[in-house]
Each structure stands twice: as C-alpha cells, then as structure tokens.
Amino acid sequence: MTLDASRLAAVISPLRRALLAAAKEREGLPNIPDAQIEVLRALPPGVVRSPGELAAELGLQRSTLSNLLGGMEQTDLITRQPGAGDRRQVEVRASTLALQHLTAFDQAATEILADVTGALGPDDQRLLSDALPSLERLRAALQTRPKPLPDHRSKDLRT
C-alpha cells in the first residue's frame, strides 16, 4: 500500500484549523496568529530565549521575528528584558497571560477531540489510536529534517 501524501497534506491543515477554531470559540480565546503561537510554543513556562535562538529554532529571519515580538509585546503575550549577565542581550519569555491562553486552548482541544472521536465508531477510534505513533514520528521527522541551503534566486515571477 502506498501512502497518498497529497491526501494526507489536504487533511492535516484543515483539521488543525478546524480544531483551532473550535477551541477558540469554546474558550472565547483571542485570535492569536499562527506565527505568534509558534513563538509561544517555543517559550514554555520557565524558558527564556534570545531572539536569535528563537529565530534559529523557528527558521525565521531575525527581522521577521523582531516584528513578531514587537506585536506580541504590545498585546502582552511576551516580555523582553535585558540579559542578566550581559545587558546587550535580550531575554524573551512568554507572559502569564499567553501561558494561560495556551493552557486553555490545549484543554479545550483535548476535550473537543475526546468528544468528537468518542462519537466515531470503534473501528475509526482504533485506527486513529493506532496511527498516533506514526503521526508522532512524522512530526519529529518534519521537525528534524535538514534545512535546504538558502536559494538566492528569486521565487517570484521576475527572471
């Protein structure tokens, strides 16, 4: 049997968006852009990172991350402070408010998935349960795949 990668790709993104929308609606959570959520996921409770570390981990340009952090700071999702040992450095951490939002989202998403999968038939529940380890390995493979070298050629329509 050959995996239909196109079908898998066509299911993953809408599934994620549907779960995100349902959890936000259920908990009355603010609309936090995906890019900002990615930053917050990289800053779990007690973790402090520099903007450079975050940019490298998330595969973003430093200027892009700087713009994200500016918006996040304005909405009280992160704090930026001078480094303890070197005041030229900046330490970024998720705010208490952001961590509360993430916790509420995670709890709502878990409850929603439990409700929805509980309404499926036992065969579908078993198949989903059996697929979890493979999906976890797929996620890990995507997160650890080598990044291609930068291609300095333009990706737009200019020649």
Image (cartoon, rainbow, N blue to C red):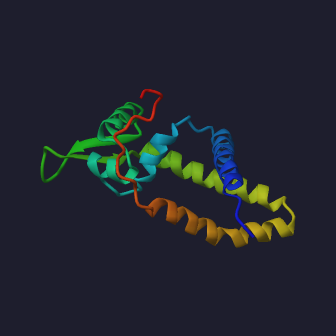
Residue 42: image x %, image y %? Answer: 41, 53
Residue at the image point whose x is 34% and y is 40% from the top: 152
Residue at the image point whose x is 69% and y is 69% from the top: 131
Comparing 131 with 141, the one in front is 141
Question: Is residue 50 visible to us here?
Answer: no
Comparing 136 with 91, the one in front is 136
Pick the quarter of the image with the C terminus: top left
Residue at the image point whose x is 45% and y is 62% from the top: 145
User: 134 above or below 109?
Assistant: below
Residue 132: image x %, image y %? Answer: 65, 68
Comparing 73 with 137, the one in front is 137
Pick the quarter of the image with the N terminus: bottom right
Q: Could you tell whether 24 is left or right of 140 in the image?
A: right
Residue 7: image x %, image y %? Answer: 71, 53
Question: Is residue 67 visible to us here?
Answer: yes
Residue at the image point whose x is 87% and y is 64% from the top: 121
Q: Residue reaching furthest right?
A: 121
Q: Residue reaching furthest top?
A: 158
Q: Residue reaching furthest front?
A: 159
Q: Could you tell whether 64 is left or right of 82 in the image?
A: right
Q: Could you tell whether 29 is left or right of 19 in the image?
A: left
Residue 23: image x %, image y %? Answer: 65, 45
User: 110 above or below 69?
Assistant: below
Q: Splitting the image into 4 quarters, where does residue 70 fall?
A: top left
The mark tally for this picture is 0
